[in-house]
Image: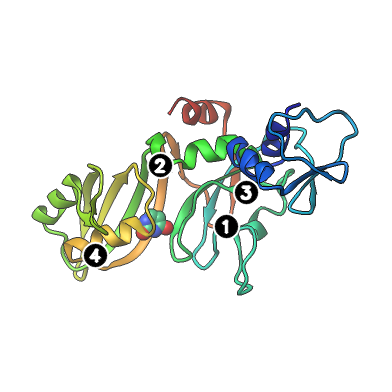
Amino acid sequence: MRLNKYIARSGVCSRRDADGLTAAGNVKINGAVVTVLGRDVKDGDVVEVNGRVVEPAKKSVYIVLNKPKGYITTASDEHDRPTVMELVADVEARVFPVGRLDADTTGLLIMTNDGDFGNAVAHPGHEVYKTYRVRAEGVVSDERMARLRRGVELNGRRTAPAEATFVRQSAGSTVIDLKIREGRNRQVRKMLAAVGNKVIDLQRTAIGDIRLGGLKPGHWRKLTQAEIDSLRRA
Ligand code: URA
């Protein structure tokens, strides 16, 4: 198997990033640094990435987790905060988050040990739609909804057209669904702030055709083959 595929199948990163790590001298085969791309890994070879032995998973595993508040979306945290990895310790393979959710954001997080798949879904150019249920302070007027749909200026760049749907109004807050295809840092919170509303609660309810449905916070389920295929097509 080619070296970059071997590394991606180990869940470390995508094939492209594996090439980057290799070119930078961070990959060894049988103890010797390899900087040539496209090397073949043979049965019995020991591959190390950044000093850690990696091995391709026997089988690709794809799950969806309902992330609770307070968990961070990285494999380890320097401040010892709880990470989503703790919630998937009982999954048969070591799976990694695809993209990120803020610590305060809840909801749908895809996790996999297939580095190429994860990279493709998270890549901004790939236009997979993500849907968020947003509870915002005050009233999100029709005019503000229209601005969210058209796109708002964030850090000097307008956000792509989005879908915004009114859900309900209560005394102090408005609930809307916002469907976006970019994944800029804290994008939904910043979009709402740009039109004048502070986000109180944020939950991701869908990525493409994959829905959270009745999955309880802190629980995970496997993606169905149809769901995996739908993301591959997207
Ligand atoms: N937008 C945000 O502001 N936060 C998230 O976690 C996801 C999207």
Q: Is disc 3 placed on a helix, strand or loop?
A: strand
Q: Is disc 4 placed on a helix, strand or loop?
A: helix
The answer to whether the residue bearing label 3 lies less than 8 angstroms from the nearest atom of ligand 1 is no
Q: Is disc 1 placed on a helix, strand or loop?
A: loop
Q: Residue at x 27, y 59 (%)?
A: 155
Identify the mark nearer the N-term, 4 or 3. 3
Vertical comparison of 187 with 114: above or below: below
Q: Quadrant of the N terminus?
A: top right
Q: In the rendered structure, which amino acid carries the disc numbered 1?
A: Gly
Give the number of the disc on residue 124. Answer: 2
Q: Which residue is mark 3?
A: 96
Q: Which residue is mark 4?
A: 193
Q: In the rendered structure, which amino acid carries the disc numbered 3?
A: Phe
The mark lying in front, picked from 2 and 1, is 2
- Quarter of the image holding residue 87? bottom right
Vertical comparison of 178 with 232: above or below: below
